[in-house]
Amino acid sequence: MVDLVQARTIVVLADCHIHPAPGIVWPQAALDAFDGADLFVTLGDMGARAGLDALARIAPIIGVKGRDDEDDPRTAPPRRVLAVAGLRIACVFDRVEAGAALRVDPLVCASSETLMRLFEAPLDALLWASTHTPSIDRTAGRLHVNPGSVTLPGKDAPASFARLTLTNDAIEGEIIHLHGR
């Protein structure tokens, strides 16, 4: 599935497990830090639709389904490709399950040929989740981003999300750490 989207600033989220009834909600510091987002991309395990609805009040939202997600058309597919500003950004929940990596620790990415088969064209970025730990790097000219988690960070990981900035056919990414979550 390829989605044509228009955005210059994309906030990437994952592994937040938002479930208001048991008490996991968006921290105000996170909502404040999302200011300026043109689009939210969620990479799975967002939890209840209420979490998506809260984000949708700030900017449009699109994503993929993880293991802890209520059914929602905004995040239904297991993988998707965003075509934005002349760039192709692939989104998956678990890179190994999706076939985009052979293993995670240590990371062994799938070959460019395999990624081409999975996503039907070359990629400028691959967004992934399922570890609750942020990481960002550029391999073979492709940006690889795991935003971590705003609400349930991994052991010794900060509460975090990623921000992508798209300009002039280029994509830059950064991990944003939330302090005092």
Image (cartoon, grey):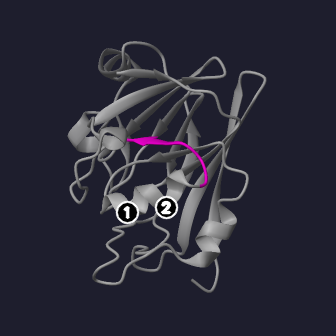
Q: Is residue 140 visible?
A: yes
Q: Quadrant of residue 90?
A: top left
Look at the image and say whether residue 132 sits in the magenta stretch: no
Q: Please, what is the three-letter code of the amino acid marked with disc 2?
A: Ala
Residue located 43% across and 13% down the image = 121
Q: Residues within 10 Å of mark 2 (few under 14, many from 20)?
A: few
Q: Which residues are magenta?
A: 58-63
Q: Residue at x 67, y 49 (%)?
A: 37
Q: Which residue is mark 2?
A: 54
Residue at x-position 25% and y-position 56%:
69
Residue 156 in the image: x percent, y percent?
Answer: 46, 80
The disc at residue 50 is 1
Task: State the image coordinates of residue 98 (x, y, percent, origin top left).
Answer: 25, 36
- Asked if labels 1 and 2 touch by Cβ distance under 8 angstroms, the answer is yes
With 115 as the anchor, is 139 left or right in this view?
Answer: right
Q: Classify residue 160 by image quadrant.
A: bottom right
Quadrant of the image for the N terminus?
top left
Residue 140 vertical position relative to residue 108 in the rendered view, above or below: above
